[in-house]
Image (cartoon, helix red, strand yellow):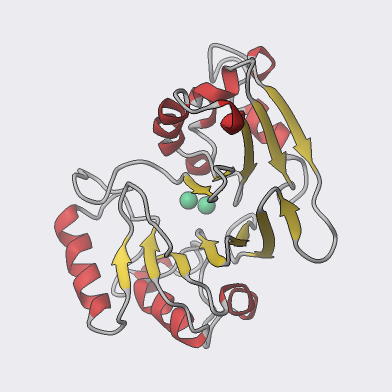
């Protein structure tokens, strides 16, 4: 995310959660998942089970999947949960982008044991040690944000969503309540937003409004626009920090919840 990135990273979205017992939950399969795959190649036996969630099927969130090396490993069991809010399945989206002529190898050639699981009509879902709730995002074609509880910590993944005209998004407010960490869509700078209203993205100011309303401990501003370089993202971060005590622009690399 970012045009010529050195500090804030240049991959499209992929976030992974690692529980204290080593269980892994992957959110989205943007280009960042290629690097995650390289790290996982050296992991131990208990890490061969990988659970995945997707926010939606826009290309920046699925395009890395064909190059996720664990998906091609016969030792790996990959569980993918839920389905797109607009109908169809994640399976169709992931397969479709590998169909000829978009990719040289079909989805069916992948070596891992890949299965697609449903999602309950109501209430949270237990994915190993992760208890996950979700809400719909305000984004073209729809999508989901997720609340992930694990090891007595709460992480909320809320990307590709646009704030309402006034107040905060009710669904996201409930999802983000008392979260230890909120990853929020801050694609547009506030002065850019009026010309991009309806594109399904938000700003750092609305991220802070949501974080304040929901008593979030820490906010990470995510989904940087490709036109924003390191300098402009640093300025965004500085401005945000004048208004909220614990906020940063998201960077590549680990975040530890303690
Ligand atoms: Zn999108
Ligand atoms: Zn996106």
Q: Is residue 174 above or below residue 51?
A: below
| Residue at far left of view | 231
| Residue at far front of view | 21
Report whether 44 appears left or right of 255. right
Residue 72 showing in the rendered view: yes
Q: Quadrant of residue 175?
A: bottom right
x and y percentages locating residue 195 in the rendered image:
37, 69
| Residue at far right of view | 121
Residue at 54 percent across and 37 percent down: it is 62
x and y percentages locating residue 66 in the rendered image:
53, 24
Q: Quadrant of residue 106?
A: top right
Report whether 192 appears left or right of 256. left
Report whether 45 appears left or right of 184. right
x and y percentages locating residue 25 in the rendered image:
58, 45
Quadrant where the C terminus sits is bottom left
Q: Is residue 19 above or below residue 210?
A: above
Residue at 47 percent across and 44 percent down: it is 14
x and y percentages locating residue 224 in the rendered image:
34, 55
Residue at 35 percent across and 65 percent down: it is 188
State the residue in front, 47 or 135. 47
Residue at 36 percent across and 78 percent down: it is 205
Q: Is residue 101 above or below residue 167?
A: above
How many marks on residues? 0
State the residue in front, 20 or 80. 20
């Amino acid at each position: 995310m970012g045009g010529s990135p050195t500090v804030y990273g240049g991959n499209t979205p992929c976030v992974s959660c690692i529980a204290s017992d080593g269980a892994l939950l992957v959110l989205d399969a943007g280009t960042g998942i290629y690097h995650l795959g390289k790290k996982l190649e050296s992991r131990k036996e208990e890490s061969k089970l990988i659970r995945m969630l997707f926010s939606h099927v826009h290309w920046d969130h699925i395009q890395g999947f064909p190059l996720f090396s664990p998906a091609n490993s016969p030792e790996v069991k990959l569980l993918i949960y839920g389905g797109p809010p607009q109908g169809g399945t994640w399976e169709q989206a992931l397969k479709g982008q590998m169909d000829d002529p978009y990719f040289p190898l079909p989805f069916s050639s992948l070596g891992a044991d890949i299965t697609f699981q449903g999602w309950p009509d109501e209430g949270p879902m237990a994915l190993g040690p992760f208890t996950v709730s979700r809400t719909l995002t305000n984004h073209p074609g729809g999508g989901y944000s997720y609340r992930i509880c694990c090891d007595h910590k709460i992480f909320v993944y809320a990307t590709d969503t646009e704030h309402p005209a006034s107040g905060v998004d009710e669904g996201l407010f409930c999802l983000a309540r008392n979260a230890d960490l909120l990853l929020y869509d801050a694609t547009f700078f506030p002065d850019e937003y009026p010309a991009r209203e309806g594109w399904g993205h938000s700003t750092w100011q609305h991220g802070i409004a949501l974080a304040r309303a929901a008593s979030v401990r820490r906010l990470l501003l995510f989904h940087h626009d490709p036109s924003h370089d390191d300098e402009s993202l640093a300025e965004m971060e500085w401005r945000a920090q004048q208004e909220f005590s614990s906020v940063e622009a998201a960077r590549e690399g680990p975040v530890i919840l303690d």
